[in-house]
């Protein structure tokens, strides 16, 4: 768990370290509101992420490894995560006939409906969290985040 360090008067925190901590605190603060909304729908963050990935994939669905590659935060046990979603009727899995090693996962109508009920509350939450920055600052923030991510790739 990351904690905020108190600056030592004998040395300044490196600018990179201070930026890292600020980003971590912001991510934690923003995620807390989303977690509370998802809890009402009995979903975890990774489960919600999987449902959104599968909605975006459309009818063809995705193999387990493809879903894992697209997750925001890696989940070490993708199979169990999909098992829980399948038990709730939110996704379906089918072993492909051409290559029996591949199991394709698709979002179900119930999964689509659940996401539809969450779309507006999540959107409103994000607006309440970030709209005060205004469009220009948000665009600048996005550009900086993308630049930071592309440099480490």
Image (spheres, rainbow, N blue to C red):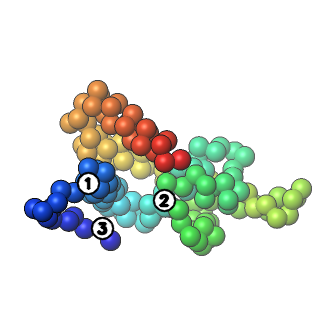
- For label 1, the crowd category at 10 Å Cα-Cα, with few meaning under 14, some 14 to 19 and many 20 or more, is few
Camera-nearest label, 2 or 1 = 1
Given the current orientation, which residue lies at the most extreme left position? Answer: 9
Image height check: is 141 above or below 94? above
Res 66 → quadrant = bottom right
Element type where label 1 sits in the image = loop
Q: Which mark is residue 2?
A: 3
Q: Nearer the viewer, residue 128 or 85?
A: 128
Residue at (71% x, 56% y) in the render: 63
Res 13 → quadrant = bottom left
Image height check: is 47 above or below 1? above
**Mark 1 or mark 3: whose residue is earlier in sequence:** 3
Residue at (36% x, 47% y) in the render: 122
- For label 3, the crowd category at 10 Å Cα-Cα, with few meaning under 14, some 14 to 19 and many 20 or more, is few
| Residue contact between numbered discs 1 and 3, judged by CB atoms under 8 Å | no
Asked whether residue 32 appears in the rendered view, the answer is: yes
Determine which residue is flagged by label 1: 14
**Mark 3 or mark 2: whose residue is earlier in sequence:** 3
Q: Which mark is residue 73?
A: 2
**Mark 2 or mark 1: whose residue is earlier in sequence:** 1
């Amino acid at each position: 768990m990351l904690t905020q360090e108190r600056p030592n008067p004998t040395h300044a925190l490196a600018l990179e370290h201070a930026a890292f901590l600020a980003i971590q605190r912001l991510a934690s603060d923003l995620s807390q509101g989303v977690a509370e909304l998802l809890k009402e729908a009995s979903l975890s963050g990774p489960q919600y992420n999987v449902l959104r990935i599968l909605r975006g994939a459309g009818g063809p669905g995705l193999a387990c490894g493809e879903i894992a590659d697209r997750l925001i935060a890696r989940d070490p046990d993708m199979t169990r995560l999909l098992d829980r979603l399948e038990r709730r009727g939110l996704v379906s899995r089918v072993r492909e006939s051409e290559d029996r090693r591949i199991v394709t996962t698709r979002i179900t109508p119930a999964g689509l409906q659940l996401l539809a009920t969450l779309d507006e509350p999540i959107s409103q939450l994000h607006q309440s969290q970030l709209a005060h920055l205004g469009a220009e600052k948000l665009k600048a923030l996005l550009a900086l985040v993308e630049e930071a991510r592309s440099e480490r790739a």
